[in-house]
Image (tube, rainbow, N blue to C red):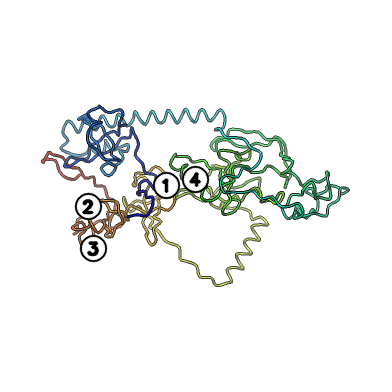
């Protein structure tokens, strides 16, 4: 038995059924049948009283208009086009044909409702940005603490109040060069010091505006000198554990906009719920601003703007730059190396001279293990597993969250860890259910499940379009 709390694979990957979802349901010897998941409170009282287990939910069958309680293992999502696929088959009775018509109509109704709701949300957000709380300073959350250094520990520059621009952009201020802000009680330039932009919040005037494809953006209302301070990135200061929890909640709720930026491994600024106007600055592959990490009053501020892909997915970039990489977190195609990048490049060249053994990167197949086609694929994270899949072939609308094991590693019967595997599709079985499920094929003695002909099993990359159906009508074929 698992130790502590445990979640099944579907819940870990965010694959959850919901009320008013159209699904295919399998009961006994009946064929797969289209139905709608119902809220238990909305079904007739006699159906509510039927015996059922924890986790079961009622479904309404199209065509026959019956109800029944089922669990997640007996259903899979209905997708657009299923009606046309099923209609192309033979031996359909009138009830099943009626069920297909009703399911397709209801699917379109629910789709229209969802699109209307999304359109209203888009229209509402086009008038003003989504709500957030405007704050002026970083707010620590949970275990995070902001430690302010003693004045005696704060570095002192050599600038003088009589200098032309003491501690300014064109000065030789040692603190400015080292990305330290001068402290008003320590700096020898006193009130003439021009290196206190964070403390005095000397931000150039900006305004929000609606972009064409990138949501809301930040527009400056005056010209800004090269090297001039623009804004401080402000938000809630959280640790890595809280960051993972927030990402998990965002993934479950379908949230795609993130404001998480890393200061250190265990200190992240989240400007989503709380922040200032800097949260509206958009990404660009050819940016006109740069990010820097400064120390103010002994406390490290701002952030390191490194974007990592969440799960196995990528977020498209719409910055419009000539050197746009196409995705956030991917290097621009022809980026001009800055002085910092040159230093980093030289450091890497020096490191290459040392002989360091590195772990060989796991290689994945470039076609879907379920349908055999290529394209944009989700990679299995299990060690030494090369399999990849289309999101559609996994019945997913979003990439899995965090580390993800593909269906090949869960038993088809009970969902536990597999010990026997079909080598031509993701079917697999645990030790309790593998008896008689796999057969030695003629292709190099590889094992295959009942979905394949042992004399001519499907080779890797060959498309597979088989939909099993069963019915009490013995004249109806078992497969099409």
Q: Nearer the viewer, mark 4 or mark 3?
A: 4
Determine which of the numbered discs, if any, sits on residue 399 in the image. 1
Alpha carbon of mark 4 to alpha carbon of mark 3: how far?
41 Å
The numbered mark, 2 or 1, whose residue comes first in the sequence reads 1
Residue at the spot of label 2: 451
The numbered mark, 2 or 4, whose residue comes first in the sequence reads 4
Q: Give the image location of residue 466, x and y in percent.
A: 24, 47
Q: Give the image location of residue 102, x and y in percent.
A: 26, 29
| Mark 1, secondary structure of its residue | loop
For the view shown, which residue lies furthest in the right direction?
162
Q: Give the image location of residue 216, x and y in percent.
A: 58, 35
Residue 374 horizontal side relative to residue 265, left or right: left
Viewer-proximal residue, 385 or 55?
55
Is residue 477 visible in the rendered image? The answer is yes
Residue at the spot of label 4: 315
Viewer-proximal residue, 143 or 241?
143
């Amino acid at each position: 038995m698992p130790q502590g709390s445990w979640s099944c694979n579907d819940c870990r990957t965010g694959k959850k059924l919901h009320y008013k979802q159209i699904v295919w349901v399998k009961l006994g010897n009946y064929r797969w049948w289209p139905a709608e998941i119902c809220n238990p409170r909305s079904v007739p009282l006699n159906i509510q009283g039927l015996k059922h287990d924890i986790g079961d939910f009622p479904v309404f069958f199209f065509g026959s208009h019956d109800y029944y309680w089922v669990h997640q293992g007996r259903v899979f999502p209905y997708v657009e086009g299923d009606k046309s696929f099923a209609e192309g088959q033979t031996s359909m009775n009138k009830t099943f044909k009626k069920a297909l018509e009703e399911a397709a109509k209801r699917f379109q109704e629910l789709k229209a409702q969802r699109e209307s709701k999304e359109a209203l949300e888009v229209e509402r957000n086009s008038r003003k940005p989504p709500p957030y709380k405007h704050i002026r300073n970083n707010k620590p959350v949970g275990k995070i603490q902001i430690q302010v250094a003693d004045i005696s520990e704060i570095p002192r520059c050599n600038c003088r109040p009589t200098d032309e621009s003491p501690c300014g952009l064109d000065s030789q201020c040692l603190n400015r060069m080292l990305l330290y802000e001068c402290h008003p009680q320590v700096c020898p330039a006193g009130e003439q010091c021009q290196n206190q932009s964070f403390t005095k919040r000397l931000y150039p005037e900006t305004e929000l505006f609606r972009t064409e494809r990138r949501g809301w953006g930040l527009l400056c209302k005056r010209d800004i000198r090269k090297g001039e301070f623009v804004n401080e990135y402000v938000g809630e200061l959280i640790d890595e554990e809280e960051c993972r929890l927030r990402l998990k909640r965002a993934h479950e709720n379908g949230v795609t906009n993130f404001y998480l930026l890393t200061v250190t491994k265990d200190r992240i600024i989240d400007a989503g719920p709380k922040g200032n106007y800097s949260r509206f600055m958009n990404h660009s592959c050819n940016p006109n601003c740069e990010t820097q990490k400064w120390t103010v009053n002994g406390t490290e501020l701002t952030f390191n703007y490194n974007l990592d892909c969440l799960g196995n997915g990528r977020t498209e970039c719409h910055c419009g730059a000539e050197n746009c990489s196409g995705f956030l977190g991917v290097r621009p195609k022809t980026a001009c190396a800055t002085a910092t990048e040159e230093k980093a490049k030289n450091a890497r060249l020096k490191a290459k001279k040392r002989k360091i053994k590195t772990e060989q990167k796991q290689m994945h197949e470039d076609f879907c293990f379920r349908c055999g086609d290529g394209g944009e694929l989700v990679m299995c994270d299990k060690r030494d597993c090369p399999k990849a899949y289309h999101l559609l072939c996994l019945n997913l609308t979003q990439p899995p969250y965090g580390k993800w094991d593909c269906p090949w590693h869960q038993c088809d019967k009970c969902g536990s860890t597999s010990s026997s595997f079909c080598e031509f599709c993701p079917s697999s079985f645990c030790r309790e259910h593998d008896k008689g499920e796999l057969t030695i094929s003629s292709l190099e003695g590889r094992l295959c499940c009942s979905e394949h002909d042992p004399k001519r099993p499907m080779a890797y990359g060959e498309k597979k379009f088989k939909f099993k159906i069963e019915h009490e009508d013995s004249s109806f074929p078992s497969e099409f």
